[in-house]
Amino acid sequence: MSKVSLFETVAQQYNKAADRIKLDPEIRKILAKPMNELVVNFPVKMDDGHIQIFTGYRVQHNNVMGPFKGGLRYHPMVNIDEVRALAAWMTWKVAVTGIPYGGAKGGIQLDPKKYSINELERITRRFTYALGDSIGPDYDIPAPDVNTNPQIMAWILDTYLSTLPPQERLRSIHVVTGKPVESGGSIGRNKATGQGIVFCIEKWAKDNCFDLSKASYAVQGFGNVGSWSARLLKPHGLKMVAVEDVSGAIVNPEGIDPDALQAYLTEKKTILGFPGSKTVDHATFFSTPADFFIPAALENQITAETAPLLKVQVVFEGANGPTDTEGDAVLQARKIELIPDILCNSGGVIVSYFEWLQNKRSESWDLEEVDSKLKKRICNAYDRVKETRTELDVDWRTAAYVVALRRLEIVYKERGIFP
Ligand code: NAD
């Protein structure tokens, strides 16, 4: 585990980039802190009739570029420091990709495995009610994150709409993104983060004349982001040689089929015991030789302890904040390239933006349109970060921050500070 708070990690990354471009000191003060922080304690009736109090969070980091946007996480480790950090990363992410949003994040501190489906529905509805007007279709728009999914977004949508006058309901379905397609979601949203990571891997391979069909990789986390990345890499011929999730880690140098692993996980609720694989410990998983490592689980995984173990050429950050500052330094010293979270996993928020646009315009785009627009946007962002990296001779993460900070700096300078 990292010794510093997650928001401190964000601050270290931010300060490094701000120093490099001598960001305006007044704007620097503004962006260093979140705009709004909401903590709600709310009661929910459990299946056996007793009442339990839950704590939920929503941090709105910055909205100078547009409405607040960011996921909701259900996890026992959710706390104000983590949500603050994740909200700030959203501000940088949307600014890197040029999406007209601001950054936010939220969640509930709970272990969803301990609750029935009916309890999760009541918890979600009561949380939405507690958030009240702090969210809204043109103000702050939640989306899925760790342990939340399209079903949970549908409950949020239904609860939010039920609190509005009838004539306002149908023009407010863009209050959440990542909804089921039937309830106004976008085709292609579920796989979007994984798809964006695959577009980044393709870009990197092309730039480096690297043959993907002979490549191998390890993935940490086999949920939405990890499993979709793996399944979308399969047609390129890449071999998945190691996988770790909350239940443990498996390796197979001959390759693990992502679709078969997904089917196995759905049935057995664990990746352990997958035919042909060997169960290994955390250190062995990190030491597995491969071309790429895709962290797609939680934050603070690549640290001073684990970064020296990696035997890969490139890290593609699927998770938010998987590498702490010390881990970053070790990777740089070892010349392991790293495509940072705020660029690499931005496919999710990009397609959330497309869903929001479709809802506002009463449109429904097909998969080809969604994927081609996603590719264009993430590849443009990739190129811009790459150019900035060359211009300033900095690492990928700092270059991505610089792209974001330059955009935000221009907007603040144009608009000034009220009053
Ligand atoms: P998810 O809940 O679908 O999957 C999380 C995965 O991480 C699961 O496979 C779980 O078993 C694994 N995991 C949990 N604890 C672990 C541990 N201690 N060691 C190893 N594996 C562990 O969540 P997700 O939506 O795939 O999100 C994963 C990461 O990607 C998060 O950092 C999230 O913020 C980020 N992200 C998600 C999206 C999105 O669209 N869902 C977009 C951008 C970034």
Image: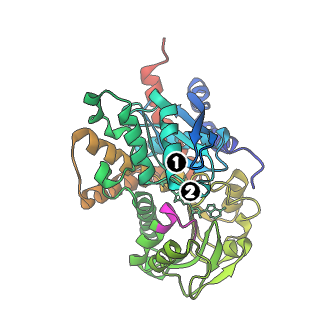
Q: Marks 2 and 1, how far apart in space?
A: 16 Å
Q: Position of residue 239 (x, y in %)?
A: 50, 80
Name, please, the residue furthest toward the front.
49
- Indicate the amino acid at tag 1: Ala
Left or right of 227: which side holds 370?
left
- N-terminal-most mark, 2 or 1: 2
The residue shown at (48%, 48%) is: 121
Q: Residues within 10 Å of mark 1 (few under 14, many from 20)?
A: many
Q: Residue furthest top?
A: 419
Q: Which label belongs to residue 400?
A: 1
Q: Inspect this view and state whether residue 20 appears.
A: no
Q: Quadrant of residue 89?
A: top right
Magenta-colored stretch includes residue 222: yes
Q: Whole-percent x and y of residue 279?
A: 67, 80
Q: Is mark 2 within 8 Å of ligand 1?
A: yes
For the residue pair 384 and 251, the one nearer the viewer reads as 251
Q: Which residues are magenta?
A: 219-227
Is 282 situated above or below 62? Answer: below
Residue 319: numbered disc = 2
Is there any visible trace of residue 415 in the rendered image? yes
User: Which SS class for mark 2?
Assistant: loop
Residue 407: % across, % down: 45, 36
Residue 249 position, x and y percent, is 65, 74
Query: Which of the image's four quarters has the N terminus?
Result: bottom right
Question: On screen, 245 above or below 169?
Answer: below
Magenta stretch: includes residue 53: no
Query: Is residue 43 or residue 179 the one in the foreground?
Result: 43
